[in-house]
Amino acid sequence: MDLERKSLGLGRKPALIVVDMIHGFTDPACALGYDCPEVVTANARLVDEFHARALPVYFTTVIYRSDDQARVFRERVPALNVLKPGSHWVQVDERLHMRDGDVLVEKQWASAFHHTDLDTRLRQGGVDSLVVTGLTTSGCVRATAVDGLQYDYRVVVPREAVADRNAAAHAANLFDLHAKYADVLDLAEVLAQLPPGGSL
């Protein structure tokens, strides 16, 4: 039996957290990547809407600067080792319209919060809720959304703006996120909840 839950939606000042929409994950030429143009399009739409409302946008990338960073994670998934400083694979996909004023968070593990200053930056900016998007649903998106709740932010995940290599894992993780940790909504519903404007 499912737990009773309450939809919370977005607060007064949401931030957009675009998780790992980097070439290493959006380009099928990389061992980590696959073709997901519809997810790129949905993310670009959200980025543009947040920019238009002067609401904060955070992108994440994964970069390994030494052999001891996330050692066990990289032993388990050796393809991660291509994510090196200066590599094409660690660059944010240019189709997402990243611009000056957006924040790039460098991470080494699944969650955008783990061993980063993301929470500090969000609180300094007065952020009270998160729209979490990106790749992949069962991995870094899920970890970031769960940690968002654990740091006491309302979290919303737009269905069209996340994806996974495995369709069953994608569906199961969206179900689980919606049951416990976040509001999983259609993109149109998320856009309708955005406040008219704010300041970075």
Image (cartoon, rainbow, N blue to C red):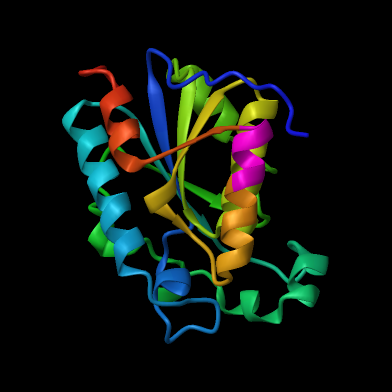
Q: Nearer the viewer, residue 53 or 65?
A: 53
Residue at 47% in and 73% down: 24
Residue at 47% in and 70% down: 25
Residue at 45% in and 77% down: 34
Does residue 139 lie above or below 116 as drawn?
below
From this viewpoint, which residue is outermost toward the right? 72
Q: Say which quarter of the image contains residue 71.
A: bottom right
Horizontal side, residue 157 vs residue 197: left or right: right
The reply to whether the magenta stretch includes residue 95 is no
Q: Nearer the viewer, residue 25 or 162?
A: 162
Q: Quadrant of the C terminus?
A: top left
Horizontal side, residue 186 vs residue 138: left or right: left
Horizontal side, residue 74 vs residue 59: left or right: right
Q: Position of residue 178 (x, y in %)?
A: 59, 37
Q: Is residue 110 visible?
A: yes
Residue at 39% in and 77% down: 27
Q: Position of residue 107 (x, y in %)?
A: 60, 52
Q: Is residue 113 visible?
A: no
From this viewpoint, which residue is outermost toward the front? 1
Q: Say which quarter of the image contains residue 72.
A: bottom right
Horizontal side, residue 155 vs residue 1: left or right: left
Q: Nearer the viewer, residue 1 or 99?
A: 1
Q: Main secondary structure of the magenta part?
A: helix
Q: Quadrant of the N terminus?
A: top right
Q: Position of residue 67 (x, y in %)?
A: 74, 72
Range drawn in magenta: 175-181
Q: Position of residue 84 (x, y in %)?
A: 55, 72
